[in-house]
Image: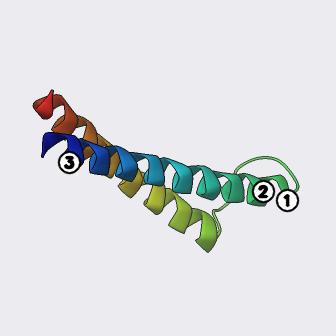
Amino acid sequence: MKTRRSIVLLSLLLFTFCIGILTFDDASAAQRNRKGSGVATLTDSEKATMIYMREEEKIARDVYIKMYELW
């Protein structure tokens, strides 16, 4: 039972990591397309990406805490 749960948690962690990489790459492309220097406002897509990344980090933290409790 513990092995199955740990496989599920590790799969979830890997999935969120892969999604994060894809999202980060998209945000990097948007930043490269900007011209000029100084402070720029974020686009709606970049704001959504930042919110998604924050939530992803919260999930990762919960997974790490749960894994620590299990082992």
The image's colouring method is rainbow
Q: Indicate the position of residue 6 as horizontal and vertical percent values.
A: 24, 42
* Residue located 54% across and 62% down the image: 49
| Kind of residue indicated by mark 3 | Arg
Estimate how packed mark 1 is, as few (under 14), some (14 to 19) or many (20 or more) residues with alpha carbons within 10 Å: few
Name the residue carrying label 2: 29
State the CA–CA distance, disc 1 to disc 2. Answer: 6 Å
Q: Determine the residue located farthest toward the right in the rendered image.
A: 35
Taking 33 as reference, is 60 left or right? Answer: left
State the CA–CA distance, disc 3 to disc 1. Answer: 43 Å
Per the image, label 2 sits on a secondary structure element best described as helix
Q: Indicate the position of residue 16 as horizontal and vertical percent values.
A: 45, 53
Residue 51 in which image quadrant:
bottom left
Of tags 3 and 1, the one toward the viewer is 3
Residue 35 in view: yes
Task: Out of 17 and 25, give the one closest to the viewer.
Answer: 17
